[in-house]
Amino acid sequence: DQQVKQNSPSLSVQEGRISILNCDYTNSMFDYFLWYKKYPAEGPTFLISISSIKDKNEDGRFTVFLNKSAKHLSLHIVPSQPGDSAVYFCAAHQGAQKLVFGQGTRLTINP
Amino acid sequence: DGGITQSPKYLFRKEGQNVTLSCEQNLNHDAMYWYRQDPGQGLRLIYYSQIVNDFQKGDIAEGYSVSREKKESFPLTVTSAQKNPTAFYLCASSMGGAGRQETQYFGPGTRLLVL
């Protein structure tokens, strides 16, 4: 029972263009969502988060959008840079500090 | 320089052996967590602790044990009962507090391999 799903295992984007990573969830009780970036053999690094009372949060090149009616969130990276190549995980807060993670999307930025 | 440290970076386990993974944080966080990552999959929660001397099972606790005797430390033991222990293990911490919308911060991970 996958409560948080990232349906695209991989995404390839040209440098300078916009990268859009998507995430769907099933549990309407989730109240806080996070995106993490992960390089191979390293721990995930926190990128950006959004509370369920908002529909958008922006931090520099990163913007997260939340559509509660569709149970969908997305991460926009613009402009994309080579250093953005990594695996991106979305996660949802389930109370008692528990996070539920998606399977991840591998983003490759091509020069 | 605050952060989360995990040791060792690589760990080899023989059949029937228990091994312990270390996790230490100096962020003064109350809550700590252990996750497991398998290739092509997301992170799955093994155990978590919201406060010293207290911990709860996560989604895949079978074959694992933890202790939380100090705020800074949350070691994970992979027992011989864990039949498929080969994975990348990640420790995380957060400030803690019931109901808070929190960010978890991760250590660099330990890769466990079975000989």
Image (cartoon, helix red, strand yellow):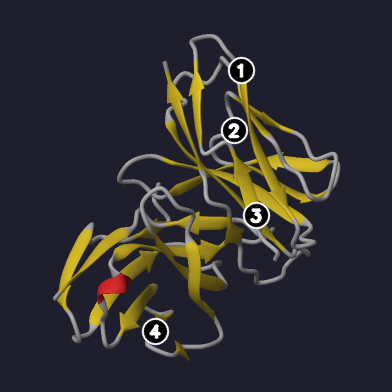
| Residue type highlighted by circle 1 | Asn
* Quadrant including the C terminus of chain B: top left
Sequence-wise, which precedes: disc 2 or disc 1?
1
Quote the CA–CA distance across marks 4 and 1. 43 Å
* Pointers 2 and 4 within a single chain: no
Quote the CA–CA distance across marks 3 and 1. 23 Å
Query: Measured from the top left, where is residue A111 in percent x and y?
Result: 13, 76
Sequence-wise, which precedes: disc 2 or disc 3?
3
Which residue is tagged 4? A62
| Residue type highlighted by circle 2 | Ala
Residue closest to the eye, B38 or A5: B38
As drawn, B96 above or below A57: above
Which residue is tagged 3? B4
Which numbered circle lies on residue B61? 2
Which residue occupies 39% across, 51% down? A2
Please give left or right for residue B90 compared with residue A55 in the image: right
Instruction: Look at the numbered discs 2 and 1 and tell me whether their residues touch, using CB distance below 8 Å.
Output: no
Q: Quadrant of residue B87?
A: top left
Tell me the mark number nearer the camera, choosing from 3 and 4.
Answer: 3
Sequence-wise, which precedes: disc 3 or disc 1?
3
Q: Which residue is at the far front?
A: B1
Q: Tell me the SS state at disc 3.
A: strand
Tell me the mark number nearer the camera, choosing from 2 and 4.
Answer: 4
Q: Tell me the SS state at disc 4.
A: strand
Q: Chain of mark 2?
A: B
Quote the CA–CA distance across marks 2 and 4. 35 Å
Q: Chain of mark 1?
A: B
Query: Measured from the top left, where is residue B18 in percent x and y?
Result: 61, 17
Instruction: Look at the numbered discs 3 and 1 and tell me whether their residues touch, using CB distance below 8 Å.
Output: no
| Residue type highlighted by circle 3 | Ile
Which numbered circle lies on residue B18? 1
